[in-house]
Amino acid sequence: MAKTSTKGRAKDSAGRKSKSRAKAANAGRWPEPGVQAAPPKDTDAPIRMQASFDVIPPDRRAALESLSINLARAAMTAQGAIAEAALRQAERPAALSADPFHIGPAMNEVMGRLAGQPDRLMRAQADLYGRYMELWRAATRGAAGDPQPPVATPAKSDKRFSDPDWSANPMFDVIKQSYLITSGWLNDLVGGVEGIDPLTKRRVEFFTKMLTDAFSPSNFLLSNPAALREAIETNGESIARGMKNFAADLERGDGQLQISQTDLAQFKVGENVATSPGKVIFQNDLIQILQFSPTTERVAELPLLIFPPWINKYYILDLRPGNSMIRWLTAQGLSVFVTSWVNPDSHMAAKTFEDYLEEGIYAAVSAVTRQAGVEKLNAVGYCIGGTMLSCALAHMAARGDRRIASATFFAAQQDFSQAGDLLIFTDEEWLKDLEGRMDASGGVLPGQSMAETFNALRANDLIWSFFVSNYLMGKEPKPFDLLFWNADQTRMPKALHLFYLRKFYVENALAKGDLVLAGERLDLGKVTIPIYAQSSKEDHIAPARSVYAGARLFGGPVTFTLAGSGHIAGVINAPEAKKYQHWINPALPPTLDEWLAGAIEHAGSWWPHWTKWLKARSGGETAARDPAHGPLKPLEDAPGSFVKVKS
């Protein structure tokens, strides 16, 4: 009996194994035709699941349902927007270059140099490993109730990790410090490479920082405590709003993402920005000249003519009454004229730098001196407008034209050997690609292209902060007049723009004395009129060192001033705001460091110092000039029509 029983058990066991293998082989398959599928063994599971769901309190059930609905809405919105953008992109020509900024060759050179220094790489890797071990030791001790000082901390100016949970929550604290260690290590590794061209190295450093900034944990929903908290508190509504904002920005960019930095609908030129009263008293193909109404009974004899950059609208000088430089200057008893540049279309693609000199600078000087009834005026050039004014001064000096009595420069460069980060975008290969892009756009560079370039120079502030706020947290951009102006870029004519980039950024021809315009070789040393050169301490477009080097090229007396903040806020800083500071030193030693050593810091705006300098060179006083009753007949009210043309 025992023997038989054993065989039976073996047979039963074999049968069970065979059935198990058959069941496994058919798992997930549809039943064969005519065969009834076996019902699930646990037929009460749905009932128990419903019972478990019923146990959840009603308020939590409602929250889960809301979360599910909002996540579904967000997914559908994002999918629809991306699909629509893909269709629009498919209708466009293929990109001119897979590497439009030509970072590939520079990166290969840097990586090749690193590969040839294995000992340095090993030391760097050992250092990275040591920093990570230090972080994990600190995290472990902190978890055990023994708080440790952070291994890595963000810079004081870094706003990405300002939320308290980045430090208070151990998990997010480790994520933050891991990122800071890794990104700092990579940027230091690239920055420490020696034996290569400085511009090549600078280009790789810039794009390495762009890459590490893009991969910051603050830019991802699941690793951003503030965004996660917002999603939980709103039951996913913030995510749905964020994807709605994302879709709207894709639509606004016609399939290309244009991140909103402010509520554009809240501003209108001539109504709540660019509101200083005045008249357009002259116009040609390139400029309108605005004469602003006086606010004092008497004004300085010599009028003031301002040349803003032609890449921007002039109303950076007139955003609102409280920070309007134009209103400030008229209140100081000055006759103020401003050049409003045209927003060129394809019909102006062939307009050259010489055209802008003749029809811009020279035409404006002639119109203003006639309107004011004077032989001379004082001039101001801001940024690119200042570079062109410098060329005009050298050209006028060569021809004996003395109609400009003094010149002021706001953040303007003449010597581009130490120019800002825009230098990394300028080489012959990049210029060829840029020319192709302009040809594809009818001979002009779209305003959005320049806006994207300037935003990339401060990616954390002008790209990623809005990416997080608009999309991850679902917030609406706040109204901000400065960012409205920043988004209101103008187009660039092909001939003008290529000449400017090649002659100044690539060749540095003006500083070297190699630039020839309208038959004259330009020599800034022959410009002997008084010069006031303003720069800003944190300017990333026209760095203070570059502005200082240019100021030393002039042949006459130069007053150099350094303001706090950057390219815009350092210039547009009304005294009433009581913000920032400025440094003054009447000397002009060989280097900026020497100048700083002897400079005296003063609180607040530099405008009063400049205005005192300017009025001392503006002659006596005369009756206020009414723009409606001058020799030139008014054409329309300020701000004019040129400034209202959108790109």
Image: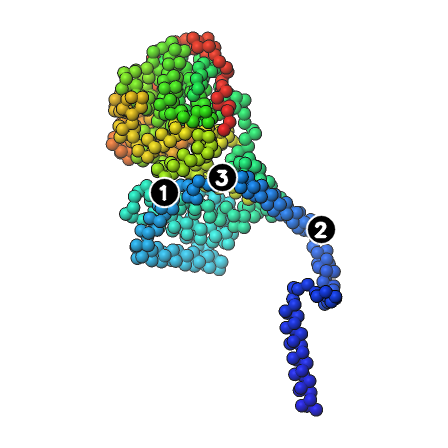
- Residue bearing the label numbered 2: 58
Residue at 39% across / 11% down in the picture?
370
Disc on the earlier residue, 2 or 3: 2
Side of 36 relative to 324 (left or right): right
Q: Position of residue 460 (x, y in %)?
A: 45, 41
| Disc 3 versus disc 1: nearer the observer | 3
Q: Dot 1 corresponds to which residue?
A: 203
Give, as a three-letter code, the residue at label 2. Pro
Q: CA distance from mark 3 to mark 1?
A: 28 Å
Give amino acid for label 1: Arg
Crowd class of label 1 (few under 14; some 14 to 19; many from 20; radius 10 Å): many
Pointers 2 and 1 in contact (C-beta within 8 Å): no
Answer yes or no: is residue 322 visible: no
The secondary structure type at the circle numbered 2 is: helix
Q: Position of residue 250 (x, y in %)?
A: 55, 38
Measured along the vertical axis of the image, is residue 301 above or below residue 421?
Answer: above
Q: Residue at x 52, y 21 (%)?
A: 270
Residue drawn at x 36%, y 29% is: 499
